[in-house]
Amino acid sequence: MTTMLTPSLTEQQIADYHEDGYIIVRNVLSGKETDELRRVVQQEVIRDAYPSTLKYPQSAKYTVSGNRLAAPGLTAIAEHPTVIGAVESVLGQPAHLTAYVAYLRTPGDKGAGAHCDYKRWRPVGSSMNWVFAIIPLTDFDADYGPFLVSPKSHKLTQVIDKDAHILDLTRPDAKQLAPFIDPELKAGDLLVVNEHVWHKAPAGTTTEDRCGIFNKYCAVNAPPAAGYYPYNPAALDVLSDDGKRLIPTCFDTPITTTRLLIEDTSGQESKFLLHRDGEWKLPGGEGWEEEKLVGWDVGARIGAMQELAKTQLDLEVPWMSYIEDVEAEDSICRVYGFSDENLDLDAHANDGYDWFTESEMRQRLGESHTICRAVDTWYQASIIRGKGKACHQSRQQFE
């Protein structure tokens, strides 16, 4: 299952996906393959699963995720050629694996209510173009618990201004949801689901575990606004040579600092705020990992950067969008961007801070400076960016 063939769906299947918000490919895995993968997931849950406070087989949802794709028996499904072919067909782009996830629900788990998984504060959910690739390892039926979808519900969310540099979305109205339907997924099927499709997972009645793969892939030109999940070299190394292209970021050192490219767009030429601290730097500094409502989906540092901006500049930053990760000797700096046409330039041009036009900044720092390279990435026209927010803003993510 490790050869990257990337076959395409038919034009009709792609059209059906865009119309309904999902597409089903039957019998992607054989019964033998699903049995073996389910056995491995169950072993990993027993050994070590999220949340660590649970003890299998306590009634709950258990998660095996992220760098655990390096565990023996778990790797191949991430780069399965039929899965990648279907994913890239509907994304219209090569894919990045934003989340490797296996869920296991033990008997008695209550399931999950209706929701969609576009979430501005999570690495897995904040791309403007991503999909679930769901593969049941048990039947998703009345006994185990079905996976229900609301057809066409992805159309309830629309881009407000398609020509904007940073895209924003309308808030979906849950009252307009079409009735949920059961796609009658069997073990080994593949369900590719749009990020904005509403879905729910009612509880089952069986005395056996409900198990499935729920991987997430984004288009390479639509990075998560919160930033990518940080894969480690062990996860990258287990993939085939072709499969390695699925891993967007890979480092073996922690993300310790977060900095923000602040762009003023009020004039004919944009200006950027820099801070003189021995050398010119972007605002920011040591940050912290968001955990509330995130859990295993680590990597978002927006909340930390918002606090740093408030402390350093007395500036409220309502959103920001991921640019890149910059490697230092023993750590990683996660860089975000923010632009506004209503900034008070005079209020922030003090205490070592000053505004520079792009040309002034390039002349002072040099084209190869990391800040200038961040500006190049920020302006890259092919990249589709959304607005990332912090966990504490989650209740107002569309407001």
Image (spheres, rainbow, N blue to C red):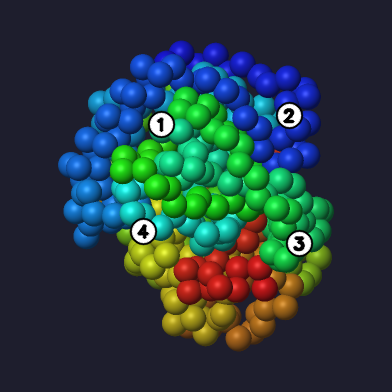
Give the mark nearest the N terminus, 3 or 4.
3
Tell which tag, 2 or 1, sits nearer the viewer: 1
Disc 2 from disc 1: Cα separation: 25 Å
Residue sitting at x 61%, y 42%:
182
The residue wearing badge 4 is: 295
Direction from residue 53 to residue 35 in the image, left or right: right
Give the mark nearest the N terminus, 4 or 2.
2
Residue sitting at x 46%, y 33%:
139
- One can see residue 250 in this view: no
The residue wearing badge 2 is: 14
**Disc count in the image?**
4
Q: Nearer the viewer, residue 205 or 8?
A: 205
Q: Amino acid at mark 4?
A: Gly
- Rendered location of residue 6, percent (x, y): 58, 18
- Rendered location of residue 57, percent (x, y): 22, 49
Q: Amino acid at mark 3?
A: Gln
Residue 289 is marked as none
Disc 3 from disc 2: Cα separation: 24 Å
Whether 183 is drawn above or below 106: the answer is above
Tell which tag, 3 or 2, sits nearer the viewer: 3
State the SS at label 1: loop
Give the mark nearest the N terminus, 3 or 2.
2
Category of crowding for the residue at label 1, using alpha-carbon neighbours closer than 10 angstroms: few (below 14), some (14–19), many (at least 20) = many
Give the mark nearest the N terminus, 2 or 1.
2
Residue sitting at x 73%, y 20%:
10
Residue 176 is marked as 3
Q: Amino acid at mark 1?
A: Leu
Category of crowding for the residue at label 2, using alpha-carbon neighbours closer than 10 angstroms: few (below 14), some (14–19), many (at least 20) = some
- Rendered location of residue 138, percent (x, y): 41, 33
Q: Quadrant of the C terminus?
A: bottom right
Disc 4 from disc 2: Cα separation: 33 Å
State the SS at label 2: helix
